[in-house]
Image: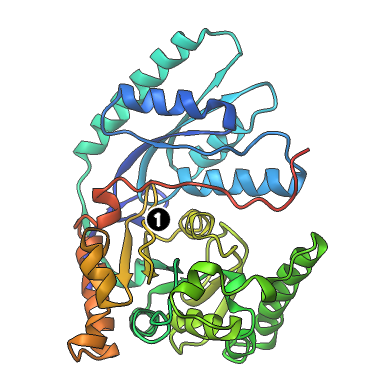
Amino acid sequence: MKTFEGYRRTNGTIGVRNHTIVINTVGELAGLTKKLANLVPGVIPVVHQAGQSQYYEDSDQTIKTLAGTAGHPNVCAALFLGMGTEDPAEGIVETLKKDGHHVHSIIFDKDKSINECLKEGKAWLENELERSKQQKTEKADVSELIIGLECGGSDAWSGITANPSIGVFSDSIVADGGTSILAETTEAVGAEHILANRAVNQEVCNRFLEIVKRYEQRARAVGEDIKAANPSPGNKTGGLTTLEEKSLGCIKKGGNSTLMEVIDYAHSPTVNGFVFMDTPGYDVESVVGLVAGGAQIVLFSTGKGSPTGSPIAPVIKIGTNPKLYENMPEHIDVNAGKIIDQNYTIEQIGEEIYSKVLEVANGEITASEKYNNQEFSIWRLAETQ
C-alpha cells in the first residue's frame, strides 16, 4: 500500500501543502493583495485580473475558480479581498465556512479606510499562519490523491518520452484507486475519437465529443481555426509538424485507463479514476482549473522549458529531452530525456514519476516552488462588458 503524510481538512479532504493565502475577487485589488501578503511573510498572494465587467458565464466561472482555490485541500486558511456592494467575497466565504474552511473576507470601500482594512487583514493572516504551523500531518492512502496532467511548450519528443511516461504513472495511480485529470480540450482535437472510445459509457463519450465540438465552434465564432493555429510556432520549432501529431502526443499523458468522467473547468471529479477536464490550451489557465478542481499536485511535461507553476499546488516538471535538462536543470524535476540517451524505458520513467509524486506529497519542494513560480489566471469565456 502506497501512502503519504498530508494535512487532513474538516471536510475530509487531505492536502499535501498547508498554505495560508490572500486572494482578490476583483482585478483592482491585485496590488493591495500583494501588499498585504508582503506584510506577513509566509502568506501567499493569489492574484488575478478578473472579476469585474463580466458576463454571467465568466462571473460564475470566476467565482467557482476562486472558491475552489480557497477551499483547496492544500490551503489551511484564505483571506478574500473584495470591493463594492455586489462583490462575491462574502458569499464565497459563507459557503466555504459551512464546509469547515478557515476563511474571512474584507470589503474595501465599505466603511473602513484602506489602512484599517490592511491592519485587519494583517492581524487575521498572522493568527491563521501561526495556527497552520501547529497542524500535524497524518498518513493517507494514495487513493486520496488527485493529480492534474498538463503540458506546455511541447516538442517532437513530448509524445515519445515524457507524455507516455506520465501515461504509465496515470494508469498506475488509477490502478491504486487514485484520480488523474487530463486537460486542454484544444489539444485533444484530431485525436478526440481515441479518448471517446475509452469512455466508460455512451453518456461520457458524448459529453467528451460535445466539449471538443463546442470549443471548435467557439473559436470559429471569432474567426479563428484551432486546426490552422496548431501546432504553434514554438511547437514547430521543437519539431512538431501537424495538429494530429501534437494531439496524439498530448493524450498519451492519459495512459490507457477507462475515461470515467468529463468535468467542466474548475469542477471537482465525482468519481475516482481517469477524468477529463474542459480547459483551454493556455497552460496557466489550464493549471488553475485543474487545481481549483482539487488536484493536489500537477504533472507538467515540457520540451521548451515552460516554468509555469501554481500558487498553492506543487507542479512537477518532466523534461522531454536531454538538451532541455542540460540547459535548464533548475526547472526540471524528472528528466524523461534519459529515454533518449541513457536507455531508460518509458515504464522506468513512469515509475520515477510515481516516486517523485510520493516524495512531493510528503513535502519535497518542486523546482517551480523553489523559484516561486506562482502564475494564476482564470479562463475567460466571453468578452469584457
Q: Mark 1 is on which residue type?
A: Thr
Picture coordinates of residue 238 (x, y %)? 43, 75
Q: Is residue 124 above or below residue 111?
A: below
Whether residue 239 is visible: yes
Is residue 33 or residue 140 the one in the foreground? 33
Seen at 45% across and 9% down, the residue is: 116
Give the side of residue 269 with respect to residue 344, left or right.
right
Residue 207, given in percent of the width and then of the height, sits at 69, 77
Can you identify the residue that label 1 sits on?
308
Quarter of the view holding residue 27:
top right
Residue 1 visible to an observer of this rendering: no
The residue lying furthest to the right in this view is 221
Left/right of residue 336 with respect to residue 115 in the rendered view: left
Q: Quadrant of the N terminus?
A: bottom left
Name which quarter of the figure residue 331 lies in: bottom left
Residue 145 shown left or right of residue 46 in the figure? left
Q: Is residue 164 above or below residue 33?
A: below
User: Around disc 1, counting alpha carbons within 10 Å, would you say few (fewer than 14), some (14 to 19), or many (20 or more)?
Assistant: many
SS for callout 1:
loop
